[in-house]
Amino acid sequence: MIELPEAVVLARQINQTLTAKRVRQATANQSPHKFAQNRPTVLDYFTLPGPMTGAGNQQCLLDETPTDVAALCRLVQGVMIHVLWADQYGIHLPESRKEEVQLRSTSARLERILELDSRPLGQVRPPERRAVGNCRDFTVMLTAILRHHGVPARARCGFGRYFTPNQYEDHWVCEYWNSELQRWLLVDAQLDELQCRKLSISFDPLDVLRDQFIVGGRAWQMCRAREADPEAFGISDMHGLWFVRGNLVRDVATLNKVELLPWDSWGILEELTDE
């Protein structure tokens, strides 16, 4: 890849050479520069881990994980429990356990998983010995493992329509490139058999319909075009166009491999108004 100083030099040379001249013909990929010969693709980019999806010293744990997406979702569900669904599994979480949702990186979460139960990741833990997380954490873990196996994957921040009737609820899912189908698929790693039954899920969580999960950018477009009511987007008592704007920014960040915590805020994200 061309680094910034080199890009500045090349831009200056092009400007000096081409000023007041007309380009009649151009031939691609003839430059001796390695960037022209081996240009990385979008799929290449999303195959490599980012700051939040690198496994660090726990990388060997991921070597033993399956590559099948369905099996990986079951694995993630077997080592993690959603902070807001714990009671549905018969678990009362003390406040100290709920703090596990503050873990940002995959490496830190893997360490916590092993602290609670040192067995291999493929061994399903009882609910009380699963690491506590939320939809973002289920998503980031699946994304990290897929990237570890060389599968292009990315977290997506947006809104799910399958939690509360007539509402777009704050949610995260994983999006991965299916090489067989040659398209990106949305996967909700949080939805296990119990949650699918409780929520009466009618679609395949391994291929979430695009009208059931709305990515942040699309949600923003819908609201600005008055195709949807901004007041229907959010979670709990927080909703409105400002919330949609926040998830738009978070989704842009995830596409740059910075999977923020759902409550991270700065600058424009701290403006709790629709203006």
Image (tube, rainbow, N blue to C red):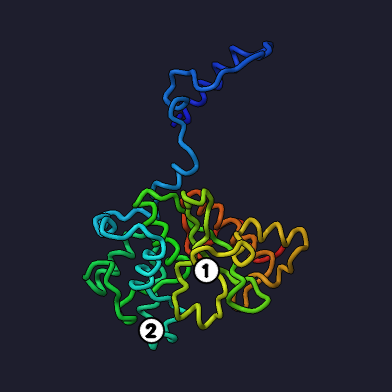
Closest to the observer, 227 or 73: 73
Q: Kindly identify the residue that appears in the image at 45 percent across and 67 percent down.
A: 189
- Coordinates of residue 4 in the picture (x, y in percent): 48, 30
The N terminus: image quadrant? top left
Q: Is residue 192 left or right of residue 117?
A: right
Above or below, 59 relative to 27: below
Amino acid at the residue labelled 2: Leu
- Coordinates of residue 186 in the picture (x, y in percent): 52, 60
Closest to the observer, 224 or 43: 43
Query: Mark 2 and 1 residues: CB-CB less than 8 Å, in contact?
Result: no
Above or below, 147 relative to 20: below
Closest to the observer, 35 or 3: 35
Q: Kindly identify the residue that appears in the image at 41 percent across and 50 percent down.
A: 151
Amino acid at the residue labelled 1: Asp
Closest to the observer, 63 or 137: 63
Q: Quadrant of residue 80?
A: bottom left
Task: Check disc 2 and report its element: helix, strand or loop.
Answer: loop
